[in-house]
Amino acid sequence: MFQDGRRLRTEGFTVKATMKNSVVAGPPAAGAFRERPSRPTTFRKFYERGEFPMALEHNTKGNHIAWKVEIEKLDYHHYLPLFFDGLCETVHPYEFFARQGVHDMLEHGGSKIQPVIPQLIIPIKNALNTRNRQVICTTLKVLQHLVMSGDMVGEALVPYYRQILPILNIFKNMNTSNTKAPGDQNNQNKLT
């Protein structure tokens, strides 16, 4: 104990914790909401090697992907899981190509999407486990687009809910921005 009125800071469940002028320090933070560093993705490796049939097209409306091959002729079993793996990326141009490539392939995929769903679960889970809010929002928008992209795609995701939903349970009560206005930009609060 100290003469000048200071309190002794101690750990819990020790003899010092029962002393009169002691304050028990709380447990360390578990870090459930802390961002996890993402490892280099296979999407980045394939992009740097130039193995994707696409290029960046600058337009007056913004940037778009110029596909060198018709999207309908792409091998969805090969390319769609790679683009989903790129959802973990936060650096330009990887983030743009992954996000836009997924949306383009889901837009034109039709019946080719449902057989690929088991291969998409691990990249979706990895993207959600980064705990990066930008990546989570992008992944949730992609999941919404995935469910609407074809018949029976939503039903095909049901067996994989146990792998996808736990991370959403952590973030269900968190706002995505500092504003709490009813009309948030891009309806981000409607993602979960």
Image: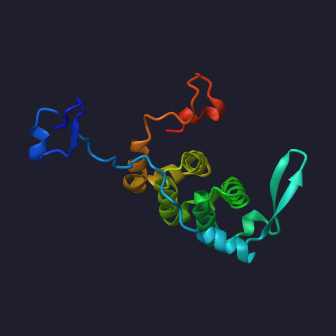
Give how far across and how far down residue 125 sits, in percent.
47, 58
From the viewer's perspective, tell me whether residue 142 is left or right of residue 37. Answer: right
From the viewer's perspective, tell me whether residue 177 is left or right of residue 56. Answer: left
- Identity of the residue drawn at 34% across and 49% down: 30
From the viewer's perspective, tell me whether residue 103 is left or right of residue 27. Answer: right
Asked if residue 76 shows in the view, the reply is no
- Identity of the residue drawn at 9% across and 38% down: 18
Color encoding of the figure: rainbow
Residue 179 vertical position relative to residue 29 in the rendered view, above or below: above
- Identity of the residue drawn at 67% across and 74% down: 46
Comparing 55 with 21, the one in front is 21
- Identity of the residue drawn at 62% across and 59% down: 89
Q: Quadrant of residue 187?
A: top right
Give how far across and how far down residue 9 sits, in percent.
23, 41
Asked if residue 179 shows in the view, the reply is yes
Quarter of the image with the N terminus is top left
From the viewer's perspective, tell me whether residue 172 is left or right of residue 28. Answer: right
Q: Quadrant of residue 76?
A: bottom right
Give how far across and how far down residue 27 sits, in percent.
26, 45
